[in-house]
Amino acid sequence: MNECMNSEIQDLLPDLEHGQLAAAVRQQVEAHLAGCESCREDLRIIRTVRSAAVFAPSIDAESVVRQIPPYRMPVPAKQAPARNRMVEWLVAGTVAVFLVGGGALLSNRQPEPQNPVVIQETPDNSGGVMLPPSPTPVRVEGHTPALSLVADTHELSDGNLQQLMDEMENFDALPNSEPEPVFAIDTSEGR
Amino acid sequence: MIPGPEERPEETDMELIERWKRGDSRAATRLVGRHSQALARFAASSGEREGIEELVQDTFVRAFASLDSFRGESTLRTWLFTIERRLMLDRRRAERRSRETVPVEESDNVSEYGALDSLIAEETQERVRRSLAALSPTQREVFTLRVQQGLSYKEIAEVVGSTEGAARVHYHNAIEKVKGLLKNE
């Protein structure tokens, strides 16, 4: 007996046995069965298995129904009261205003942190003012040298401050670096 | 003449369910009568030896208790098979625990299939029974649901918790195996 390769027909055999096929399909399957020993064997097995199942015990429907409790309508879960969408939007808007306003206020109060300029102690060979060594680098806000000078002076000791004052007096005593005015002399007179 | 309650044309399962919900116990009787034998056959084919009536009753009690969760996406019978199958699996697990033996696998299901021993007398049927007993539990379930109950592959997939394609493969493997075993006998 050759194995049938028509799996579509094989699939339909249980439906044929249960009378679930449309007339046209049933005729198609029956025509195939007439020439296919393999499918006829399948159908024989299907019929045998099906007939074997009729020996299951019979069930008394009434006794089963007596065990079934009466229907209880499911209790709907308590629903939360419907919220007003307008109130929700108002609350959300108020919170947003507070957040934005508070953020802006805080940013105005706190100066923007700038990159602090760290003055490293470096040996000054140019004859300038020697600042005393400090244990930690002096942090000076901003880049303005004047500010840094102001910031530095309070670090000076009395001796160094006096020295600075003396140096400043010397600055005043320096000769004017501006060029002397040149007056024109008429040399042609008396020729 | 308007037909009385007993003379109504065939009502659908959904109509009967609605009637039962409104308090008509006769609707429940009709539903049970309509599906109980199919459930009993499925249980017997699946290897249940004892307590098939109790199993069918438990299936209906559970089903009626949770009818609100039945949406009608599958047929009521398919849904009932699914419940019954779960109950059978629970039973078998409980039996395994009570026996405290090595986990029951394929070979054990062969002995469970002895349910049909006293039911099938003819020689051919006996040969078929032995062949079915040699199938894996899933193959046997799929095969009996397809052959005995006439379920579609889609419905079988719902009952056994598989896919339509897998159910089709199980069916074809099962029938080939049965044929091969019958040839060798």
Image (cartoon, helix red, strand yellow):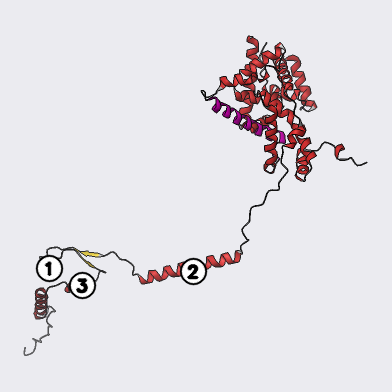
Whether residue B91 is in magenta: the answer is: yes
Which residue is at 75% across, 36% downward? A65
Instruction: Tell me: residue A181, above or below residue A143.
Output: below
Residue B79 coordinates in the image, percent (x, y):
68, 35
Q: Which chain is mark 1 on?
A: A
Q: Residue furthest top?
A: B185
The mark closer to the camera, 3 or 2, is: 2
- Kind of residue indicated by mark 1: Pro
Mark 1 lies on residue: A132
**Most prominent secondary structure in the magenta stretch?**
helix
Instruction: Tell me: residue B7, above or below residue A33.
Output: below
Label 3: how many Cα within 10 Å (few below 14, some 14–19, many 20+): some
First in sequence, mark 3 or 1: give its number.
1
What's the CA distance linking mark 3 and mark 2? 41 Å
Q: Is residue B118 left or right of residue A23?
A: left
First in sequence, mark 1 or 2: give its number.
2
Secondary structure under tag 2 reads helix
Q: Do residues under tags 1 and 2 come within 8 Å of each other at their CB atoms?
A: no
Q: Residue furthest left?
A: A190
Secondary structure under tag 3 reads helix
Residue A117 or residue B142, whichever sits in front = B142
